[in-house]
Image (cartoon, rainbow, N blue to C red):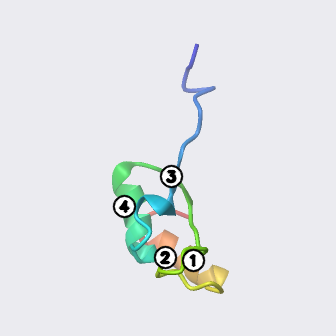
Amino acid sequence: MISPDNAPAFALNHMVAPDLPLQDFFELAARAGVADVEIRNDNPTSPIPMRMPLAEVRRAAGEAGGG
């Protein structure tokens, strides 16, 4: 039986909206009530740069209410 103590965790994968800028993706996750996300940078049309500094990713997550 699933309870709050053993409920499965879910994350929002960036591929649900691959063309959203990172900040907008984090805001989408926050509005949906999803605390965990998987960001992708392997999509050639993705607005997330291949070598975006981790500090910038954390800043964007923090501004959206996460991280």
Q: Residue furthest top?
A: 1
Task: State the residue at coordinates (50%, 70%).
Answer: 61
**Tag 2: residue type?**
Ala
Q: Under tag 1, what secondary structure?
A: helix
Question: Which residue is situated farthest in the front direction here?
Answer: 44
> Cβ–Cβ below 8 Å for labels 3 and 2?
no
Amino acid type indicated by mark 3 = Ala
Circle 4 residue? 28
- Earlier residue among tags 1 and 4: 4
**Mark 1 vs mark 3, CA separation in Å:** 15 Å
The image quarter containing residue 4 is: top right
Return the disc, 4 or 2, that comes first in the chain's sequence. 4
Disc 2, SS:
helix
Which of the image's four quarters has the N terminus? top right
Asked which quadrant contains residue 38, the reply is bottom right
Q: Choose the circle earlier in sequence order: 4 or 3.
A: 4
User: How far is the residue under mark 4 from the one under mark 2?
Assistant: 12 Å
Residue 19, placed above or below residue 13: below
Apparent side of residue 46 relative to residue 38 in the rendered image (left or right):
left
Residue that sits furthest to the left in the current view: 31
Q: Which mark is residue 25?
A: none
- The residue labelled by disc 3 is 35
* Secondary structure found at label 3: loop
Decide which of tag 1 and tag 3 comes sooner along the chain: 3
Where is mark 1, residue-wise? 57
Give coordinates of residue 49: x percent, y percent: 56, 85
